[in-house]
Amino acid sequence: MRIYHRYLGFFVAGIMAVYSISGVVLIFRDTDFLKKEYIAEKQLEPGLDANEVGREIKIKNLKFSSRSEDLAKFERGTYNTKTGLASYTVKRLPLVLDKMTHLHKAKSSEPLFFLNIFFGVALLFLVISSFWMFLRKTPVFKKGMYFAIAGIVLTLVLLFV
């Protein structure tokens, strides 16, 4: 068990670093922490309403703040109702962090989800196999059990409080 635990731990060390960094970054996804502002343009169909524009450019609850003859303004940009051109600002993480968080949030419709499943199963194996790293009668194992119980209690408190 120790050998499997050791080499699997070495094998997933890189992906664990990616998940830990992207996990911390994702905590701040509702803020502009580390994000830079970019101007984006997208050609849409002319004559769309605010909901349709929001759906196309992936801005939830988009509402037009003002409308002129051929230009509709919204909080982060404009939409030309005659030509269909939407010009708006987006805030994105730097490229490497963006790729890391995308990997972290991969959905079942994306090919990366296999990596997420493998990683989750590997972590579960590492958790379970860690209880076979020391003989049960040793002081290290008994002390480790106290830490494991404390970790489980803390997790339950955080989940339900």
Image (cartoon, helix red, strand yellow):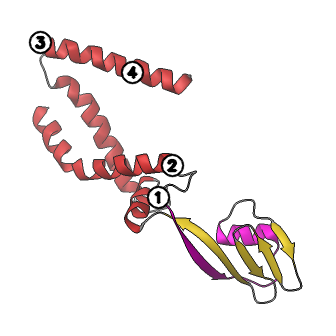
Q: Earlier in the sequence, mark 3 or mark 1?
A: 1
Frontmost residue, 114 versus 149:
149
The amino acid sitting under disc 2 is: Phe
Q: Secondary structure at mark 2?
A: loop
Q: Secondary structure at mark 1?
A: loop
Q: Which residue is mark 4?
A: 152
Frontmost residue, 110 versus 25:
25
| Label 3 with label 1: CB-CB less than 8 Å | no
Q: Earlier in the sequence, mark 4 or mark 2?
A: 2
Q: Nearer the viewer, mark 4 or mark 1?
A: 1
Circle number at residue 34: 1
How many numbered marks appear? 4
> Which residues are the magenta region?
34-58
Instruction: Find residue 145 and report its image quarter.
Output: top left
Residue 14 position, x and y percent, is 24, 52
Q: Which residue is mark 3?
A: 138
